[in-house]
Amino acid sequence: MTEITATFEKTFEALIEAKKYSAIKEILNTLRPADIAIILQNVEKTKLPLLFRLLPKETAAETFVEMESDEQELLIRSFSDAELKEVVDELYVDDAVDIVEEMPANVVKRILKQADPDMRKMINEILKYPDDSAGSIMTTEYVELKPDLTAEDAIKRIRRTGIDKETIYTCYVTDANRKLIGALTLKDILLAEDDTQIETIMHEDIVSVTTLDDQEEAAKSLSKYDLNAIPVVDKEGRLVGIITVDDAIDVIEEETTEDIEKMAAIITPTDKPYLKLSPFDIWKSRIPWLMLLMVSATFTGMIISGFEDALATTVVLTAFIPMLMDTGGNSGSQASVTVIRSLSVGDIEWADVGSVLWKELRVALMCAATLGVVVFGKLQLVDRVILDNPAVTVSVSIVVAITLMVTIVAAKLVGCSLPMLAKKLGFDPAVMASPFITTIVDALSLLIYFAIAKAVLHI
């Protein structure tokens, strides 16, 4: 597949160089908008406007939505007012809002100027909602029906207004005050008798979200209830928009990417592709956590310094410090990642903290017993016999094995409890992932190590 893609790109580049625009147009007409956006992303920027103009009007608008904000801005600046209006007129409101949020102020003015009054009003209304709220990602283009309509009248209304709607499969029923009272599918309407009233076939048990609900929770509701779209209501229960499944997928991808970056100690996640980021942007996002973790690691150095005399008498203990710290950090990370994932999908909450701790304790004991036996055998067989290291005595092996076991138990309990505590206190659990937990566990493992060494070896 990679070879085919590379061959296609070379062929496309050759056609551009040869100015075979009719052939290029034929090729683009056979592709989907998302694929066209990827192709145009890789062409020379000076030729992008020309190639974009080869697309049919509807395809051009759909492709424009799929493109990165840098390419969108470049195209907008190259468009005449008439060309910009053609694209804006073909956009759905939620897509137009996404574009407006990414553009500089002068570009936004041009977009809003070319939008028709209704579109401009809807864009401005959605922009008022807080970032990451359900209201900020909804579209106001949906099919709205009244309860006293017949199935025949409903079909006529859908035919008349549906062309401008983002989806017509799910229709929403509102009363005279626009309060959401029911929902039904196009299938329900088509299979009903012509004179059947909508209120007799609509479903009243509606899953909905409010405009101020978190966008991630709205996306989860779509997934949980297997919906194509979910209605968005205001605090009075009036229908103001819907969130479609394609927007929910974007939200889930965005939130997942953000969690992964936070777990990797990137303090300011970005939605830009990696190759679009400058080295300075990457440095700026990574350096705060690195500085914090570097400073926090001084506690580890202080602990080692405090036990210099003990290490001087039994130097061999120093060789096992990295193994103990790494195993503890890995154990804590395993527990934290599992818990963070469960928190993000709603499998567990703070009320389940007791159950989580009990389960992780049992897992930790089994892991500790297994690794404790293995490391003791390894030290005695490999280090003492095969490598002929007389300093690795039975007592030293016991100290290392016990330390490893206690560290694993402590690390797993810390790893599972910190994300839940962070969630309870209103912080992002992802922040409590690998870097932060590893730092804590490193210090704990050293304290445990030296405490056990002093007790067993009397140093």
Image: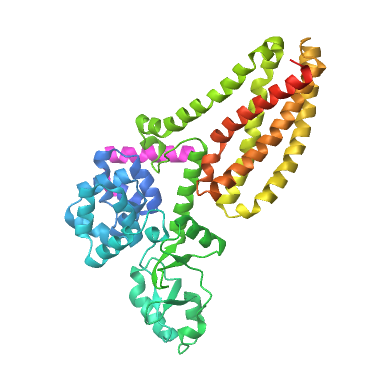
Q: Image point 65% across, 17% down: which residue?
A: 307
In this rendering, would 448 be left or right of 79?
right
Q: Is residue 291 left or right of residue 62?
A: right
Q: Position of residue 211 (x, y in %)?
A: 41, 63
- Quick check: 435 left or right of 88? right
Image quadrant in which you'd find residue 365 = top right
Q: Main secondary structure of the magenta part?
A: helix
Q: Is residue 144 above or below residue 365?
A: below
Q: Position of residue 123 (x, y in %)?
A: 29, 61
* Residue 450 position within the rendered picture, expressed as x and y whole percent measured from the top left: 69, 22
Q: Nearer the viewer, residue 288 or 180?
A: 288
245 left or right of 370 in image: left
Instruction: Report the number of numbered marks.
Output: 0
Q: Quadrant of the C terminus?
A: top right
User: Seen from this angle, which residue lies furthest bottom?
Assistant: 195
Residue segment shown in magenta: 1-23
